[in-house]
Image: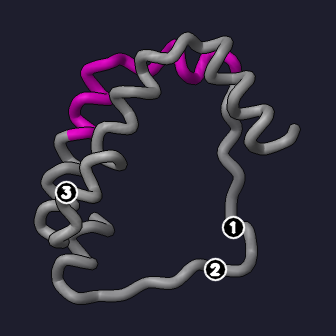
Amino acid sequence: MLMRAYALGYTGANMADVMYFIRLDEGTYQRRKYCYRLNECIVKFRGFSKLGLMPKGILYAIKPLIVGLIPIKLLNNLKKRYYKT
């Protein structure tokens, strides 16, 4: 929806206040099927193409597929390091 809005010329901005928090537990990544990641990749590819962000956008479009190949324990360790929690 956001990509379609930007493609139509609308703009957006970040909000300073946190409106909600998404809790991710250990099983979050195990419940995500790879076919959903493939669908996300297709949607991002089409959206970035419409916005004229290709070929640079290809890295962001295939990110869900790459993350889906990383073992869950390694992914959790990388997230802890990145977010320093």
Tags 1 and 2 in contact by the CB under 8 Å rule? yes
Which residue is at 22% across, 88% downward?
A: 9
Q: Residue 76, how many percent across, how many down? A: 69, 23
- Where's the N terminus, which quadrant? bottom left
Examine the image and state in which quarter residue 82 appears: top right
Specify whether residue 75 is painted magenta.
no
Q: Is residue 28 left or right of residue 84?
A: left
Residue type at the position of mark 1? Met
Q: Residue 12, how many percent across, how many down? A: 43, 84
Residue type at the position of mark 2? Met
Question: For numbered disc 1, what is the local secondary structure?
Answer: loop
Question: In terms of sequence position, does the residue under pointer 1 or pointer 3 come before the other?
Answer: 1
Q: Nearer the viewer, residue 61 or 31?
A: 61
The tag on residue 19 is 1
As drawn, 24 above or below 68: below
- Where's the C terminus, which quadrant? top right
Tags 3 and 2 in contact by the CB under 8 Å rule? no
Mark 3 — residue?
Answer: 55
Q: CA distance from mark 1 to mark 3?
A: 33 Å
Q: Residue 83, how many percent across, how many down? A: 78, 44
